[in-house]
Image (cartoon, helix red, strand yellow):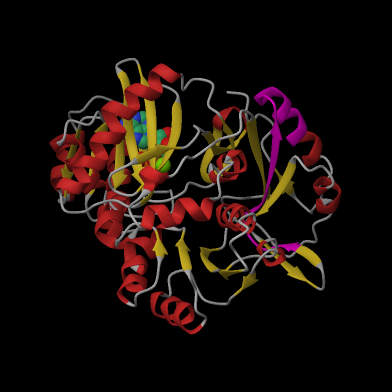
Amino acid sequence: MKVLVVGSGGREHALVWKISKSPRVSKIYCAPGNGGISDLAECVNISATDVVGMVRFAKQNGIDLTVVAPDDPLAMGMVDALQAEGLKAFGPTRDAAIIESSKVFAKHLMRRYGIPTAEYRVFESYDKAVKYVEQVQYPVVIKAEGLALGKGVIIARDFDEARDALKSMMVDKVFGEAGLRVVIEEHLAGPEVSVLIFTDGKTIIPMVSAQDHKRAYDGDQGPNTGGMGAFSPSRVYTPDIASEVEDGIIRPTIRAMAQEGRPFKGVLYFGLMLTPQGPKVLEYNARFGDPETQVVLPRLKTDIVDIFEAVIDERLDEINVEWEDNAAVCVVLASGGYPKSYRTGYEISGIDEVLKDPDMMVFHAGTKKVDGKYYTSGGRVLGITAIAKDLDTAVRKAYQSVGKIHFENMHYRRDIGRK
Ligand SMILES: Nc1ncnc2c1ncn2[C@@H]1O[C@H](COP(=O)(O)OP(=O)(O)O)[C@@H](O)[C@H]1O
Ligand SMILES: [Mg+2]
């Protein structure tokens, strides 16, 4: 069968890699893809948000399955558009993807169905929001409603910071429409864990747990990024907590979406905080996370194409999903200066050396390939994933491999997998 993957980051490279292991797949396309993906798939020059172009390509090329990975095309209804043409597509419809694309929807859903989350209020008026933050406890968390490239959440330490955040979102409209409504919520504390599940809207299959590192520098310092690394499993997500989360959060969420007439089919990502009062939901993502996917999929034994089809056909209960009893760590190599300004176009060396070890994977995020050589083309450049029997060994292996890779101004964190 022919499979099309939509997207161009490290997550999509991991997806393409895992799909390429399926004996059922004869050809993979990726739109738009990147330098590393082009070694496994034919990259097609269609933007991930070009819904019309993607549907046309899938039809003309007889694509048997399209996997829509990023948030934007899901929120725009790419899965709906593919299905309307009789094409098989993996991912939630637009009505279901709203669980990520509107934080207001997600918060109201959790309140209505008793799913544990931070206390909150929603504001559409800047003046009313400012009045409210004059009398709240600090720190307080301010969130733009919509998709904001991971930059729409501000933890305000005092009134001045809160007012500045509200002004930039609601008056200066730095996130456009996405910031016109805001959620102001209680600040929670505790370790953060990412739990992803496969679901066909009825059956749920949790994946192995993961934790990511969002800040740019060691010790969780510096600005937030798309993610500087991840590891799996989490050391703090015990079987007891997992069953509490499954019963109190995951199942109620899937039931709630069905009851709202928005059955969720695809991968649902639960961003959790393990607070002293128990696990609470920080947010939902309607898709695989990046870079969590780069540590979760290498641990998956089962053919992922079988899982995708079972989700689409609503027979996930028939699938036995198996995981390796091991650990994975992914260290992201970024362009110096990321997430602010950085330069690209530098040649990358050492990838072949790393790949001599079968337990090492190099997932490309921002690279392009020219005449057989890889060059940097983005902020996050590569994710170096190591597989080992336990986390400490995987950390050591990942950093040994990082030492073999070179490009101008390479930046990475030295404490990935150590929390
Ligand atoms: N209520 C909260 N209390 C403390 N920290 C929070 C809270 N909500 C979010 N955060 C922090 O902000 C980060 C981003 O928030 P999140 O809701 O995941 O939005 P997004 O991923 O869309 O930027 C979280 O990973 C967490 O570190
Ligand atoms: Mg998040």
Relative height, residue 414 to residue 382 (above, below): above
Left or right: 349, with 275 as reference point = right
Q: Position of residue 397 (x, y in %)?
A: 77, 32
How many numbered markers are drawn? 0
Q: Which residues are magenta?
A: 375-398
Residue located at (68% from left, 60% from top) = 343
Comparing 381 with 330, the one in front is 330
Comparing 53 with 301, the one in front is 301
Please indicate, yes or no, whether residue 57 appears anywhere in the rendered image. yes
Residue located at (32% from left, 19% from top) = 278
Q: Position of residue 260 (x, y in %)?
A: 15, 49
**Quadrant assignment for ligand 1:** top left
- Asked if residue 89 lies in the magenta stretch, the reply is no
Q: Position of residue 354 (x, y in %)?
A: 82, 46
Please indicate, yes or no, whether residue 153 appears anywhere in the rendered image. no
Quarter of the rendering occupied by the N terminus:
bottom right
Residue located at (40% from left, 39% from top) = 205
